[in-house]
Amino acid sequence: MKKTCVIGWPIAHSRSPLIHSYWLKKYGIDAVYEKKAVEPKNVAQFIANLAASEFIGCNVTIPHKETAFQAVAKADEIAGRLGAVNTVYLKDGVICGTNTDGEGFIASLRHAYPAFELRNKTAVIIGAGGAAKAIIGALLDEGVAKIGIINRTRERIHDLQLQFGSSVCEISKVISNDALESCALLVNTTSQGMESQPSLELEIQSLNPNALVADIIYTPLETAFLEKAKKQGNPVLGGLGMLLHQAVRGFELWFGVKPDVTAELYELIAADVQKAHKQ
Ligand code: ATR
């Protein structure tokens, strides 16, 4: 029987097994997807041994994505640009790595708002870490013209400017009103607003009323930041869709079937998130 898994440290919280097991059952594929707690010091070896192991591929989550990038024999262009791998697969016996976080965000947005236009638009991103980088790269690939970044640590914005060039600019939190007035998309990529984390403090009254406000957090399913945006009439997008859509390509690479992100799958994972929230 084919085996796949997600590796992380810790890994108990991961919803990837629920997602992939749903698809395996739905498509009648005789395979399993497991959670594997792999200590940081063992990650490189785990990946290097993949071809000889019982696993045909794996997902990689926090804090192993950078180590996984180093460990694969071949990383594709997107993984290279992020220096991080979240999906590992075997191709002709070669251990390959890619990163589907950015495409997961775009697919989630397109799924929820099919008519939303990104080309030549302006976006504002809060945060400058790995998730921000994945989303910025994907937005630029989609034709977004300009991306303003708000981040606590300014040096990280400068790093992103070095990588992505003049399409990316720094926005100070204090002078963000103009940027908010003109942007079509505002995305929180930081952990602010996640359960048991400090909330995201950003004034958004000046936001264009048509701007789409997204959060990559899915615990809670709708953050206080999104609630605030919704209350003032803006369309919103929670983070659960990104989690589901980033999983699609791994499944397709391992099993040869492109799975659907159905409403039923969304409800299944949302219920699991809510159950954990009540505990
Ligand atoms: P990820 O890979 O999930 O993006 P990361 O690379 O650690 O994680 O990035 C986390 C982002 O959240 C960063 O932009 C971080 O800001 P700094 O670059 O200043 O560290 C931001 N972040 C996390 N906690 C924060 C907080 N309490 N206040 C402001 N920003 C925060």
Image: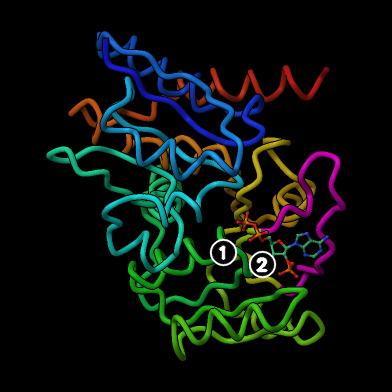
Q: Is mark 2 within 8 Å of ligand 1?
A: yes
User: Which residue lies under the disc numbered 2?
Assistant: 127
Magenta highlight on residue 192? yes
Q: In the image, which residues are magenta?
A: 190-206
Q: Is mark 1 within 8 Å of ligand 1?
A: yes
Tell me where residue 206 sits by quadrant.
Answer: bottom right
Name the residue: 57% across, 47% down: 237
Q: Position of residue 77 (x, y in %)?
A: 29, 64
Q: What colour-coding does the image apply?
A: rainbow
Three-letter code, disc 1: Ala
User: Which residue lies under the disc numbered 1?
Assistant: 132
Name the N-terminal-most of marks 1 and 2.
2
Q: Is residue 255 above or below residue 161?
A: above
Mark 1 and mark 2 in contact? Answer it, CB < 8 Å. Answer: yes
Q: Position of residue 80 (x, y in %)?
A: 36, 65
Q: Quadrant of the C terminus?
A: top right
- Residue farthest bottom in this picture: 166
Name the residue: 44% across, 76% down: 121
Front residue (pair 72, 150)? 72
Name the residue: 34% across, 73% down: 143
Front residue (pair 236, 140)? 140
